Amino acid sequence: MSKETMKICEQPRIGVFVCDCGSNIAGHLDCADVAEYAKTLPHVVYVKENLYTCSESGIVEIKTAIAKEKLNRVLVASCSPRTHHPLFSSSCAEAGLNPYLFEMVNIRDQCSWVHMGKREEATQKAKLLIKMGVAKAAGLEPQEEIESSLIRKILVVGGGIAGLSAAQALSDMELDVILVEKAQNFGGLLRSVGTLDTGDTAEAFLGRVIEDVESRPNISCHTGANVTSTGGYIGNYKVTMDTKDGEVTEKIGAMVVATGAVPLIPEGIFGYGGKGVITLMELERKLATDTLEDAGFAGKRMVFIQCAGARSSKKEYCSRICCMIAVKNAMAVKKKYPLADVRVLYRDMQMYGTRKEQMLWDARGMGVRFDVYSPENLPRVENQKVSYFQAVTGKDVELDTELTVLSTPLTARTDASALANMLRVPTDANGFFLEAHAKLRPLDFAADGIFVAGSGRYPATAVEARTQGIGVAARVAAILFKDKLVKSAIVAQINPDSCVGCMACLPICPYEAITFNREDHICEINEVLCKGCGNCAATCPSHSALLRGYKPEQLLAQIGAA
Amino acid sequence: MLDVGRHPNIELMAYSELTALTGRAGDFTAKVLKKARYVDADKCTGCGACAEVCPTPVVDLYNEGHAFRKAVYSWFAQGIPSTHAIDPDYCRVLTGKKCGICAKKCEAGAINFDQADEIVDLNVGAVVVATGYDIFDPVKMPEYRYAQLDNVITAMEFERFLSASGPTEGHIYRPSDRKIKAAKAELEKKVAKSAKGLTRFEKKHNMDSNAFVQGLTTQSIELTEDLAKDAEKWAAKAKDYNALENDFKDLAARVDKITTAKKLAFIQCVGSRDLRFYPFCSGYCCMHSIKEAIIAHEHDNDTQSVIFGMDIRAVGKGFEEYKIRGGNSSQIIYKRSRVAEITRGNNESPTLIYEDTATQKVVKEEFDLVILATACAPVKNTPELADVLGVDLDPYGFFETDPANPLDTTKAGVFVCGCAHSPMDIPESVAQASSAAARAVQAVMTAKKAS
């Protein structure tokens, strides 16, 4: 859009297109009458009723009218802007009109559909809605879309299987990766696991992945390193890390949080710490190092207690993966000690999907016993005896046991909240990172440019964490594969001359797009972060904050017309 | 869906099937069969005027057979693309009869009865299989009498009942009760027709039918020649009418008593975790049963639900909390039990026979409506598709993958996600879809680099 074309907007020449939407609108109100009325409105120089404005012919009519009638504002009265605004505004742009000079009025969803059977009233309402739209359109101003550069480098925080997988996938897509791991070695929680549910050893699997990651020229690996500060916005972050080579500052375009989770240490429950009571992760180690017998297990009896410290009033959530780990280990024990009595005391066996349920069938086949206990009546572990109420038989059972294994949940890392604060991303009630949408955006944060994968989000199996890590790469690539970031011009602006620096807008901005400039003592908006919600404009006591396209005079004109 | 439909880089080919795949990662040729819609996709605006005038009702499978659509239709209102299609099995024109009213009505001129199937060759770098799953057909489980009992339905049917745009507009009327209502409506028509027949005589002889019948039986009316001629017919018709009206009154009284279903039973693992059918756990059904029970209770606070399952697998983020909330505030009882049998009870209410494991007693209990959480079955023609793709299936009938590379099928450049991979819920499917996209991009980029 040239500056010259933008100037012609001084004298509004509005074109109004009234859509019949087949019978959707025309069937319930008088579109011809509405169109006639529109001709009488100020600044309206052209009116057309279309059977379908969104059809090929409708679009052509808009484009032709822009050129022929020298329209500098276009208003379509039809359906929902949510579905059709992009089509109409881009069509205006194709005809050489700034797309922000397009206005839409919904006379279908908000008029004909809700007032079916009241033709006269619906027609009147449609007229008023269009009158309001025309008043708003007259005051519209051309806008230029906001463009911002993108740095094609990604910071992955956490070098467990999720982070490693994300790094691999991003590197495959020819993007540069900085992989930061707090511990001295990559591998995360999977390091403490002996075998995977696939039968492969975790060490072998991890070894292959780590070797591959470390060998890639476009992944810079840092172990024993921390992220100490971050700033900036999507496409242009600046991060500082404390690494073995000292402080490193990098400019990056996106971030992936893959910091994992830690198993609960069951202090004070089920006799943990006493003789013959260990956690599931401790059993993993003992099986891997062949030191079960040192722990007092002679092959007679082992009892697993599921949900140890989980699914209680203190920690309501189910940790998803412990049942699978317990069954896997129960089978490993049974394989090694076929005569041993291996029992799993559980509330619900969470063996979802194909392979896990198969493990449960297999474990039963091998003779592992599964007994239900109820949360109101927890098993007691004392002096190498487990006593519990067997819920399905209604009997109290007491068993001698050489080893009691507590399946404890994965919990959020204690340092997760510090990282969350630094990145300005949310965590949930359990301390896990909170994604943008529980169902539809599981790998995104609400803040653009930051993503999440693995057990830091919620307990995940190795396969799930790897899947999520790879998935994050697609989410990142969707942004960084573009030449530049282009976003809607509908953002807030603050007039630096009238802003008094009261900072009222700072806490109400949900996107943290406003910063306080200490030098000039005013608030400033980062247009890339701003999503145009208008909270600041509504709050600003000096009317210095405005939302483009929704300025007070534009809205007041619209309201005044009603 | 809308985002996908509008995305400049996505070409949607709905109502199409992959018929052949040759080549290799980075350079595949896919033959796609675009089935004839008999509607020109470039012209159709999705207005639905054709469906309004189409005279041919067809059982609506989107509504699980509980409603009717037309022979020209879109699968559901928000479907993408909104292009309609004509069902060649039912359309009057396509079955050789006279009609074509839709073509007359369509202002876009989009109806094209001569459209033929089309084969399109696509050159693609990678393939993502996301063909989803089928719902297990509970007819295969004789003990639950799904085929015999109207009020034993699947979770998907219940989902449609709960929908405000579904066949019951969100009110949970039982299928057996809906049948009674339909019968009443049918009978009402018959009564009206029969009344019309009487009116003819009444007008002719200027006498009320009841008065006539009474007069005839008490011999208190004078049988004129004219009347004598009609007397037998009129009496018979009046008798028919009275019988019909009595039936109608009975039905009307029954309809008046109909309320929505208040006591619901949800049965888990129907076809899943069952060696006769599918040994695996379908993963998502515990949650949809809880969700449906919560929504039913939100809709009508008198609703009580019992969920029967071996385990309640609420394993996702926030799921256990959701389950607890259902128990605390939506009158849901969770019972650890595998229901043995469902029989017909009073008033078409299914009777469940099960062992209550908390009391170790076998219980017979009547419910208004029983909802079966049917298994996530591999799509029926998965083996054929696997053949076309040249990939292997796992022992359960889903696409085989390597846990170390969870999106990769046994053929390079072909990836799988969602329930075609294995049963899973929405967030997992979405995460997997992103991963499959990433793998597809990697495959294309790697192939480019190599060439």
Image (spheres, coloured by chain):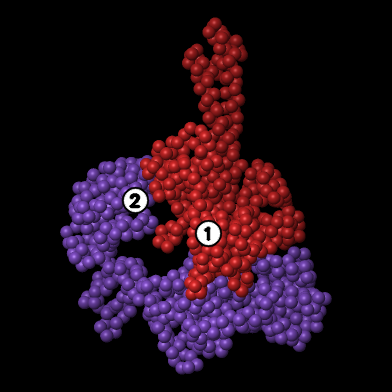
The amino acid on which the numbered mark 1 sits, given as a three-letter code, is Ala
- Find disc 2 in the rendering and name its residue: A56
- A198 or A67, nearer to the observer: A67
Q: Residue A232, image x and y in percent?
A: 38, 80
Q: Colour of chain A?
A: purple
Density class for disc 1 (Cα within 10 Å; few <14, some 14-19, many ≥20) is many
Secondary structure category for the residue under label 1: strand
| Whether residue A163 is situated above or below residue B118 in the rendered picture | below
The residue that mark 1 highlights is: B30
**Residue A229 location (% of width, % of height):** 42, 85
Residue A126 image point, x, y percent? 30, 48
Kindly give the residue lying farthest to the left in the view shown: A11
In the visual, does A320 lie left or right of A130? right
Residue at position x 51%, y 66% in the image: B27
Q: Do discs 2 and 1 share a chain? A: no
Res. A407 image quadrant: bottom right
* Between A548 and B185, the one nearer to me in the picture: A548
As drawn, A526 above or below B276? below
Kind of element beneath mark 2: helix
Q: Quadrant of residue A321?
A: bottom right
Residue at 43 percent of width and 80 percent of height:
A153
What is chain B's hue in the picture? red
At 71% from the left and 79% from the top, the residue drawn is A405
Mark 1 belongs to which subunit? B
Question: Which is nearer the eye, B64 or A122?
Answer: B64
Give the foreground label among 2 and 1: 1
Residue A36 visible: yes
Point out the image quarter for the N terminus of chain A: bottom left
Picture residue at 68% right of the left edge, 66% below the top: A357
- Apparent side of residue A106 relative to residue A444 in the rendered image (left or right): left
Residues packed near mark 2 inside 10 Å, few (<14), some (14 to 19) or many (20 plus): few
Q: What residue occupies the far top of the structure in this picture?
A: B225
